[in-house]
Amino acid sequence: MTATADLIVQQADGGAVCFISKGSAALNGVSQSNIGQPGIFTVTETAAVRIKANDTLQEHCVTPGNNGSVAIDAGITAIRIRSSHGTPPARTGHPVSATSPHLSS
């Protein structure tokens, strides 16, 4: 998964940290970006993350101060690679009826 955010870091805040975490463990970051100065930045964090059903993924951005720094246009892109539950992905050249007969009508 990849998370990105545009940051406006104020001079008095001095920097920022953004990190990806699971909703079930919000303070345990799995990937992070550090900005050590004020300015306008785009940050990106990327990680391969295994999550359980009903869990979430989050991006957190924090500064050491509280002087008006903001994160804007933040977003997360996650692609399910493999799962032991649900419908298996289609394979090129193999109809679903051949690879998963139980799904055929």
Image: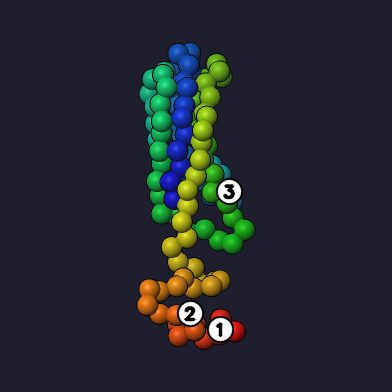
| Circle 2: element type | helix
Separation of marks 3 and 2 at Cα, in angstroms: 34 Å
Image coordinates of residue 97 in percent, x first then y, are 49, 84
Disc 1 crowd rating (10 Å Cα; few below 14, some 14-19, many 20+) is: few
Question: What residue sits right under mark 3 in the picture?
Answer: 23
Name the mark on residue 13.
Answer: none
Image coordinates of residue 6 in percent, x first then y, are 46, 30
* Mark nearer the N terminus (1 vs 3): 3
In the image shown, does 29 or 69 lie closer to the viewer?
69
Q: Residue at x 52, y 21 (%)?
A: 69
Q: Residue at x 41, y 33 (%)?
A: 43
Separation of marks 1 and 3 at Cα, in angstroms: 36 Å
Do residues under tags 2 and 1 come within 8 Å of each other at their CB atoms? yes
* Mark nearer the N terminus (3 vs 2): 3
Q: Residue type at mark 2?
A: Val
What is the total number of numbered labels drawn onto the structure image?
3
Question: What residue sits right under mark 1 in the picture?
Answer: 104
Disc 2 crowd rating (10 Å Cα; few below 14, some 14-19, many 20+) is: some
Q: Residue at x 38, y 20 (%)?
A: 37
In the image shown, does 16 or 8 lie closer to the viewer?
8
Q: Is residue 55 left or right of residue 90?
A: right
In the image shown, does 70 or 89 lie closer to the viewer?
89
Question: What residue sits right under mark 2 in the picture?
Answer: 96
Seen in the picture, residue 33 relative to 65 is either above or below; the reply is: below
Q: Nearer the viewer, mark 1 or mark 3?
A: 1
| Circle 3: element type | loop
Q: Residue type at mark 1?
A: Ser
| Circle 1: element type | loop
Image coordinates of residue 31 in percent, x first then y, are 41, 43
Q: Is residue 99 left or right of residue 54?
A: left
Seen in the picture, residue 29 relative to 5 is either above or below; the reply is: below
